[in-house]
Structure formats: structure tokens, C-alpha cells
Amino acid sequence: MKPLLILLVMCIAAASILAGCSGVVDDYDDRVRRYEQINNFQTRMAVDDWDYIWLYERNSNLTEWSPRVGH
């Protein structure tokens, strides 16, 4: 039973590699684009936090900026 389970796990791993489902391989341009999006979002959030600290805006923990970062 144990060898069958090991064989099954190895087949699933091989199938995912052959199908290209690694998901962690990015080229340089994708990484740069993602880092720019993250930095842009964090900068906008910092402005919102600064305004919240100095009570420039309404009392809210919500922001108008979307936190979604991705393609």
C-alpha cells in the first residue's frame, strides 16, 4: 500500500510539472510590475493613514484604494 501511495504522489507531481502548474516562475518584468503595484498601493495607504492620524478625513478604517495586487 505504501509503494502505491508513493507512486501516486510522484505521478501527480510529474503531471503538475509537465502541465506547467508551478505558479512561482516569474520573469523579471512581471516581478518589477508587481513590485511597482505593491509600492503604489502602500504609498496610497500611507497617505490615508497620515490623514487619519491628523484627523483630516472621516473616521474610518476603510480606504478607497483596492488592495488587490496581481495580473
Image: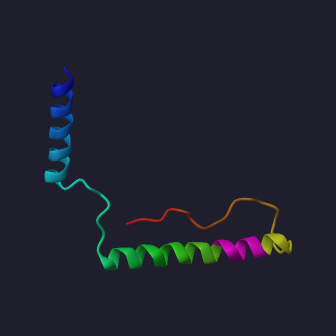
The residue lying furthest to the top in this view is 1
Horizontal relation, residue 58 to residue 23: left or right: right
Residue extending furthest toward the front: 3
Residue 6 vs 35, above or below: the answer is above
Residue 31 % position (x, y):
38, 74
Considering the image in quadrants, where does the N terminus appear? top left
Image point (69%, 59%), residue name: 62
Where in the figure is residue 5, as x and y percent of width and height?
A: 20, 28
The answer to whether 5 is drawn above or below residue 10 in the figure is above
Q: What residue is at 40 percent from the left and 79 percent from the top? A: 32
Residue under the point 33% across and 79% down: 29
> Would residue 12 be found to the left or right of residue 48 on screen?
left
Residue 64 as seen in the image, left or right of residue 4: right
Looking at the image, which is closer to me, 16 or 8?
Answer: 8
- Tell which of 38 and 4 is nearer to you: 4
Q: Quadrant of the C terminus?
A: bottom left
The image's colouring method is rainbow
Q: Which residue is at 16% across, 26% downward?
A: 4
Which residues fall within the magenta stretch? 45-50
Q: Is residue 65 magenta?
A: no
Q: Which of the 4 image quarters holds residue 57?
A: bottom right
Q: Main secondary structure of the magenta part?
A: helix
x%, y% of residue 48? Answer: 71, 72
Task: Please give the count of numbered marks on the rendered protein.
Answer: 0
> Is residue 46 on the magenta stretch?
yes
x%, y% of residue 38? 52, 72
